[in-house]
Amino acid sequence: MLHHRRSFLAASTAWTLLPYAAQSATAESAGNLHLAPFRFDVTPPMGHPCCGGWIKPVEVVDDPLEAIGVVLLGAGKPIVLCAVDWTGILNEAHVAWRTAIAEAAGTTPDRVAVHCVHQHNAPFACLEAEKLVAAQTDLQHIVFPDFHARCIDKARASVEKAIKNSVPISHVAMGSAAVERVASNRRLDRDAEGRVKSMRGSASSDARLIAMPEGLIDPLLRTVAFFNGTQKVASLHYYATHPMSYYADGRVTSDFVGLARKARQAEDATCHHVYFTGCAGNVAAGKYNNGTPKARADLTARMLAGLRASEERLNPVPVKSITWNTAEMLPTARIKPAVQELLASIANKALKGAARNRPAYEVAWARRLEKKIPIVVSALNVDGIRLLHLPAESFVQYQIRATSMVADGRVAVAAYGDGGPWYIPIKEEYPNGGYEVSVAFSDDSIDATMTAAMRRVLIG
């Protein structure tokens, strides 16, 4: 277990480096703006847990997983945006990623946004939860700490190398297009009181659920692109849906959103393409996906069409100013049962799988909040185009709220940042139950807390 201890201590050191300022706003001139694209492989090794140890571990790699991002230079301290083809990065692990990247970029952790795309045949990293399950000799690991540490080393090296090869940026643009027949709301099947009876999920073969309408989604795929003159240097893409067609078969894949991103990268090779999953806590492809290989191919094609269409609507304008805003949020834990009972569940060999594994994540979140380690919400404002960075599996209503806070609606939202809280429903949905509410690790006060943080970083 030496590898585990080394990685844990490194992350714990990083944990103490997070700045605790209540909020900050830094407006900078953009007269010498440069962009440094980076990417590196984060594919797990054979036998590594997928989705935090609940499903079959890695047996085959169908296509590699990547961490992809950009460093913005010349607007005060560097700003880093990164998307990782993993299920989630939580708590200490998330702080460790941002701290390592910040050190490599010569900036501070609050100016680094790290998000997961949220594929399920992929790693799910929570070091405190891993410590808890590793103490049980019969439990599947959550993440291999030595592999996690190697990925952080890769992040550091990749960012350092990228900065040496940055390119000037003169223009920015935002385009959007509706994605057809991909997203659908998961929480439509309800009783007369509005309580959720069943979840439509990422895939469905139930004709009754498939026949239901799409429900509340954000249909738009948004692209924010940076240009050097007329040359498109980087396109950042944002869309809100769970990104799984089928999974739990031990076959590592970036799934339909990652495959679409890779296809777009191949056909537009001179531009650096990054994909962020938006607020998809209650949105998935279940209406349009029966979990077959053909469905994955169809979803990939529809996502690729959306990527192309959003870029066709780009209208570059000169970059004049950049603002980076942050606000910290410290939600309230919603631990049922008590922590000691959760620890007992982890140790209870009569329980199976998630019944022993999931409590470790709840304990990790509770202990994190006891230490008063906040979540950082941030927004990059480039001449009125705002890129908002939110935690965990936020409901799509938060994304819709964010766009309504800004008069022209020019907001692109990345969720699945720090995954510590797991699901973040809106307040009104807590009484309605359902899977998502059952695994929300904070109470309904998180709605007002996060909405206030969003407002601060978007409009001050």
Image: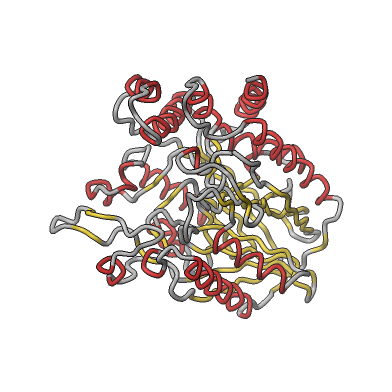
- Res. 135 in view: yes
- Res. 327 in view: no
- Given residues 315 and 296, the one toward you in this image is 296
**In the figure, is residue 412 to the left or right of 446?**
right
**In the figure, is residue 194 to the left or right of 7?**
left
**Image mark count:** 0
Q: Position of residue 72 (x, y in %)?
A: 73, 54
Q: Residue at x 50, y 52 (%)?
A: 415
Q: Position of residue 448 (x, y in %)?
A: 36, 46
Toward the front, the furthest residue is 59
Quadrant of the image containing the N terminus: top right
Q: Taking 342 as reference, is 258 above or below it?
A: below
Q: Taking 343 as reference, is 182 above or below it?
A: below
- Given residues 182 and 44, the one toward you in this image is 44
Toward the right, the furthest residue is 164
Q: Residue at x 57, y 35 (%)?
A: 143
**In the figure, is residue 194 to the left or right of 408?**
left
Q: Taking 149 as reference, is 273 above or below it?
A: below
- Given residues 283 and 389, the one toward you in this image is 283
Q: Residue at x 50, y 34 (%)?
A: 374
Q: How is the image coloured?
A: secondary structure
Q: Position of residue 215 (x, y in %)?
A: 32, 67
Q: Position of residue 381 (x, y in %)?
A: 61, 59
Residue 19 image-quadrant placement:
top right
Q: Residue at x 27, y 51 (%)?
A: 429
